[in-house]
Image: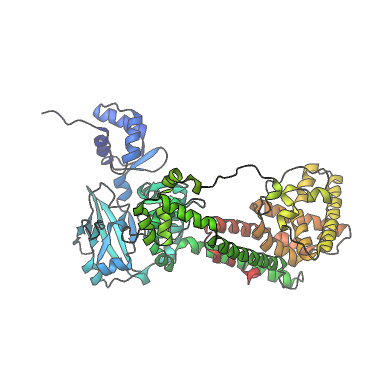
Amino acid sequence: MSKPELTIPKVLQALAAELDQPVSVAQLCDLMKTRWSVNYAVSSVRSSLRWESITLGWVRINRLQYLPLRLVLDGLRFRCWPRPQDIAEGRLPIAHLRPFAGLRRQPLPIIYDEQGAILAVKEPKKKATGFASHAAVDMRRWFQRHHFAAGDSILVEIRYQKRPELYFTYESASAFQASRVDEQDRALLQAIVKQVDAGTKPCEEVILPIFASAPWRTGYPGRPWQYLVLSDPRLHLIEDSLLQASDPYFDIGRLLLQGTSSDDVVFHPALMEQAQRVQLPAKQSVIDEITALQQEIQRSRTQDQQAGLWNGDLSRESRVADEEEGHFWDTMDEMMGVTIHMSDEMTRAVLRMQEVLPPEVLQQLSEATPEEAEVILSRHLNYLLAKAPDLFPRIDVSPTSPSNNSWITKRSVDSDSEPLDELDASAWSDDDDWDYDDEFGDEEWDDDDDEDAAFTQSVNLINQYSDYLLEMGKKHSTALAQTRLLKPYAQFLASFYQRSLHEGDYATLDEFLFYYYPNHHDGSERHIRDMCGALKQFYAFLRERGVIKDDRFAQAIWKRRDQAARLMALRQKLERDYPDQPDLLAMLFKPYMS
């Protein structure tokens, strides 16, 4: 009788059952050659592992190494939060156990309760609609025995023999030790975001490698990873198995999710409200960070008030201007909405689509909600492009002049490096990254004359400071860099208070650094600290020259430079990671927005 043929999958499965340490593909090839005298190409073995590593018993833990799956799973502990409908139906869909069990082409797991009794796993059944329901663990008696309610947990421990065995234990909602797992949940979520990056990956290729090297792999289980993903706007969980990063420009993940229902998937966006009712660490950690920073800022303000540096009253002129501008754009949005609603172009487009779309598609559209209609149309864009190209207007990609970019309100300050021979008013007003039209549009201001006079006076003072730096032996580039850092505060004072730099004070400088600048500009933490240092040096110069009597307010604000830098970093984090949660932004700037 001939020996069974050795294939790469069979050999990889055999090695996965024996090895107890991470190995590279090259090391695996060497072991195959030594053990079975087979000489497989490294590229062939790598290809098998690339597409079937989990099925073959391996987990890719980094760019070069693989670890046997049994070593990752043995002793691993995780948590399940059954949905209210799961509790009502007395079943736990296998999706709750992924990726630790229930993956494609893997046998259903053996599951035990606390007494060692086996909990039956039922195969998917055909529903009346024709769709197959999920495989699920029969939990009716177990739920009844523990009086299981929404918020309670199933703690799962995996013991790996020849195949993984899962052991269920009960934990009530009141027994959940949130503070014990906050840090590991933050680490898990951040690792997921990093792994997914800008692509789409199966959950097992993301979650298993993270758990493989996690110090808490066998410890007290944190929150279910699915709920962490649901709570984070940076991520999508598609069909319970695919992880995708959100795209602010074309979010295909959200589009795919719109076409599913809670009957099709377990972890549907409809669970978002339930997920948010449970205090998840992603948002809570940011709230804690904001609260700690605001408390520190308030302590500094109080100490400086007690030192007689200001009267304790925040100035809010830039905030008032922002509110007025926001009201203007809200009004414009409403007007545009009416215009779009009544547009003849829109009517013609609808009629044109009715002409070219197949009857069955038109029937679907007539019965669909607006959200469903969007998904249906997205599936037929190529068809419409071929049959009715007139529906798609040509895009004018001709270059626009800088003067047409007046809609830009945030500009990067770190890239501001074009040379200026002199710091005169005309050179500043022509500077592309500090254009009056860019900052304030074409609106006419009642205090234009006062603003111009204040601004001109600030420029004169800064020119004197530049000459002083050069006299002190500073390089021209150093003097230019230092004086440029004074520019934003000079414009702020002139625009909102019709004041020159020599009339700056604690309240306006606080408003500038802790409200206006982070709301209207982007800059690194280092840039913010450098700006505070430049202002401190400038006001020391004004005091030495007798222009002002006291520069203690600038020294006090300089001591708070780390606070200003952290606030800028937090604002950028909120804009990047939580764009749909304005409550966090309002919390960050609460002293000025309340």
Q: Where residue 301 sits: x, y (%)?
A: 69, 69
Tell me the quarter of the picture where residue 277 sits: bottom left
Q: Is residue 236 visible?
A: no
Q: Where residue 302 sits: x, y (%)?
A: 69, 71
Q: Where residue 390 sits: x, y (%)?
A: 50, 46
Question: Does 270 sit above or below residue 527?
Answer: below
Q: Is residue 326 visible?
A: yes
Question: Does 195 sit above or below residue 123?
Answer: above
Q: Is residue 341 left or right of residue 123?
A: right
Instruction: Please state which of residues 261 and 88 is positioned toward the viewer in this rendering.
Output: 261
Q: Is residue 302 left or right of residue 572?
A: right
- The residue depicted at 57 percent of the width and 45 percent of the height is 395
Q: Is residue 195 left or right of residue 263?
A: right
Tell me the quarter of the picture where residue 24 sits: top left
- The residue depicted at 47 percent of the width and 47 percent of the height is 197
Q: Residue furthest right?
A: 546
Instruction: Please state which of residues 307 and 318 is positioned toward the viewer in this rendering.
Output: 318
Q: Is residue 423 left or right of residue 288?
A: right
Question: Does 503 sit above or below residue 356?
Answer: below
Tell me the quarter of the picture where residue 495 sits: bottom right
Question: Does 500 sit above or below residue 481?
Answer: below
Q: Residue furthest left?
A: 1
Q: Where residue 41 sits: x, y (%)?
A: 33, 27
Q: Quadrant of the C terminus?
A: bottom right
Instruction: Please state which of residues 525 and 19 is positioned toward the viewer in this rendering.
Output: 525
